[in-house]
Amino acid sequence: MITWVTDLDEVGGLEGAWAWPVRLDSPEAARALAASPPTPCDLADAALLRSPDAGARRLLRRRLLRVLVARAQGRAVEEVALGRADDGAPQAEGAFVSLAARGDWALLAVGPSPLGVDLELVSADPPPDFGAPSEAPWAAWTAREAYAKAAGISLDDALAAEVLAVTIDRIDLRAGPRRIAAARFERDEVVCAAVVLPA
């Protein structure tokens, strides 16, 4: 299960997973960033990107993720170190994390078991069909991409998952014998999905 939060004061404990959709230029992000100065590792990670603008956004997202992890673990922000897996996915000691971003939006998640998130701007051209319901193409796309991240599989493999149902707050998929429930959240111009796999 995942809990969607709009304010970090709602986060507490790693008994469940937390997902935070946030605009990088929002007051909520500004408050969190004030508690999370960039570390040398953050700056080195941001410098890996060729575009200064892309590096600056990566730096903001990384600092926000650190605050979310700290809140969930009940630790000081300075005690949380972030790294990257071989595939580039973010990592945090003692928790599973996932991150997705588009434009000025970020979707950050932390939990006690493997999880994945995706966020898309609905103002963009709709994604390819891949058997998605016509009324919810972005919901199906984000659920499949979140599933790929959580399961550590390719997006091509995740796109083969069958969409069983789409409701206001959930997308049900079937990938072979496995049934996957993705939490769904829509806000302003973004559609978000999060998948939490059993530990």
Image (cartoon, helix red, strand yellow):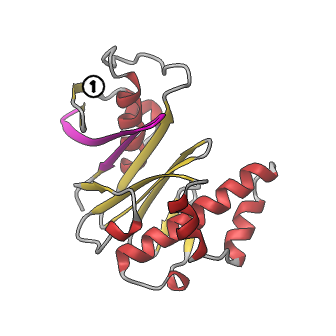
At a point 40% along the width and 33% down the height, the residue shown is 157
At a point 54% along the width and 25% down the height, the residue shown is 123
Residue 134's spot in the image, x, y percent? 34, 14
Which kind of residue does numbered mark 1 sit on?
Glu
Against 81, residue 147 (above or below) is: above
- Residue reaching furthest to the front: 27
Q: Nearer the viewer, residue 79 or 173?
A: 79
Against 30, residue 41 (above or below) is: below
Q: Which residues are magenta?
A: 176-195
Is disc 1 placed on a helix, strand or loop?
Answer: strand
Displayed quadrant of residue 27: bottom right
Displayed quadrant of residue 82: bottom right
At a point 76% along the width and 58% down the height, the residue shown is 48
Residue 93's spot in the image, x, y percent? 45, 76
Residue 179's spot in the image, x, y percent? 19, 38
Q: Quadrant of the C terminus?
A: bottom left
Against 178, residue 137 (above or below) is: above
Left or right? Give the position of 47 relative to 138: right
Q: Which residue is mark 1?
A: 162
Q: Main secondary structure of the magenta part?
A: strand
Q: Nearer the viewer, residue 113 or 35?
A: 35
Q: Is residue 183 magenta?
A: yes
Left or right? Give the position of 94 relative to 67: left
Residue 53's spot in the image, x, y percent? 77, 50
Displayed quadrant of residue 29: bottom right
Q: Label 1 crowding class (10 Å Cα cut-off): few <14, some 14-19, many 20+?
A: some
Q: Is residue 101 magenta?
A: no
Left or right? Give the position of 24 relative to 144: right
Residue 66 can be seen, yes or no:
yes
Q: Nearer the viewer, residue 191 or 29?
A: 29
